[in-house]
Image (tube, rainbow, N blue to C red):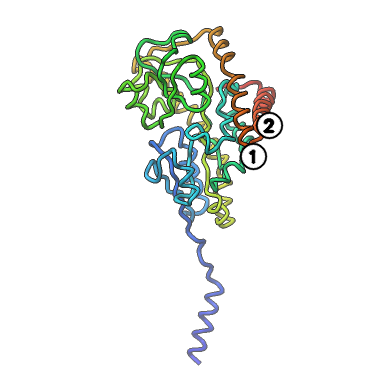
Amino acid sequence: MKKATTLTLAAAFATLYVAPAFAEQWNVSLWGKRRAFTEHVEKLAELVDQKTNGDFTLNISYGGLSNNRENLDGLSIGAFEMAQFCAGYHRDKNPSITVLELPFLGVDSLELERALSEEIYQHPAVKKDLARWNATLLMPSPMPQYNIVGKGEPLTSLSDYDGFTVRATGGIGEAMERVGAVPTSMSATEVRQALDSGVIQGAAFAPHAHLAFGTVEGGQWWTTNLNPGTVNCPVVVNTDALESLSDEHREALLGSVDEALNHYIDFYQNNTMARWQPKLDEEGIETVTYDEDEIADFRGRVADPVAQAWIEENNARGLPAQELYDQTVEFIETYKAEHGGATE
């Protein structure tokens, strides 16, 4: 009788006890160090942890999981569940999103860069392209226009770029090549050493990267308005891992993206850019500003030819390249018309 009572009580407690949600841990592969470029990932990890009471955590690694050029490869085999990469590092792996790296698209704010990326990421051809790596695009890493920190005599006109060796990736590299420069596509973590040793004479980065990777300390001059374009560096997740999440954890992740991106843009504008000019002054960096005629000449030599070459190359890959390009250009025009051409 006592045994039966014990069993009955155990059964009753079992009906009242609800097991805690399964604890989920994802590994996230980044590189370098924490900086403006990674603030949305850091914020995402914070929000997911809060929303799930610690049952779902993102373990962020800066270079400990993979080389930055191999993040897509590692993600595809499940070596980690989330990663950041830049399209220009390996254009053959992700040709569809390199449309966002074409020079002189006219993107003039972080908000527009964010909205444009999110638009193009939803295109079926882009989703199919990234699906080859078992990857789902989660969010962009909006960056302002790139400019160059250089060593030696400042390049005060476009003709001075002939033979100039510069770290420049993707469409920015193509733009520089068309004015006679010699672009190279080394990873960001290699740039300062290459600049110091004379392997390159300059580097094209957004301000946060010049700060983070020390080029501003190693340089002597800075272009204020070359503005050839930017690079597209999405955060992606392993598709199988995403689909295996519980509904609660998936909602915590996906439902935190907007807030993480809002934090990113606010941090970039109010922290990074607030430090940029004082740092240039501190290091005695000379500023180089080109007149409107030179910028118009640069744009005329680069924008249409590079875009047309991109379309032809990617049509041959089987991508709807003209459609992707047209959608990109039309979205920018519509956004500016609706938002008054807002700038950073």
The correct choice, above or below, for 65 with respect to 187 in the image is below
Amino acid under disc 1: Ala
Residue occupying image coordinates x 44% and y 51%: 79
Residue occupying image coordinates x 44% and y 8%: 156
* Mark 2 neighbour class, 10 Å CA radius: few under 14, some 14 to 19, many 20 or more: few
Residue closest to the eye, 163 or 290: 163
The correct choice, above or below, for 201 with respect to 92 in the image is above
The correct choice, above or below, for 254 with respect to 222 in the image is below
Give the residue number, with chain letter if any, for mark 2.
Answer: 323
Amino acid under disc 2: Glu
Q: Quadrant of residue 215?
A: top left
Residue closest to the eye, 14 or 177: 177
Residue with the most extreme left position: 197
Provide residue 48's location: percent of width, then percent of height. Answer: 51, 48
Q: Pick the quarter of the image with the C terminus.
A: top right
Query: In this view of the protein, can residue 265 be seen by the observer?
Result: yes
Give the residue number, with chain letter if any, for mark 1.
Answer: 125
Residue occupying image coordinates x 34% and y 17%: 283
Provide residue 83's location: percent of width, then percent of height. Answer: 48, 43
Judge from the rendering whether residue 304 lies leftward or rightward of residue 6; answer left or right.
Answer: right
Q: Quadrant of residue 63?
A: top left
Judge from the rendering whether residue 13 lies leftward or rightward of residue 336; answer left or right.
Answer: left
Contact (CB < 8 A) between labels 2 and 1? yes
Mark with earlier residue (2, 1): 1
Provide residue 143's location: percent of width, then percent of height. Answer: 51, 28
* Mark 1 neighbour class, 10 Å CA radius: few under 14, some 14 to 19, many 20 or more: some
Provide residue 233's location: percent of width, then percent of height. Answer: 51, 34
Q: CA distance from mark 2 to mark 1?
A: 10 Å
Residue closest to the eye, 12 or 226: 226
Judge from the rendering whether residue 80 lies leftward or rightward of residue 153; answer left or right.
Answer: right
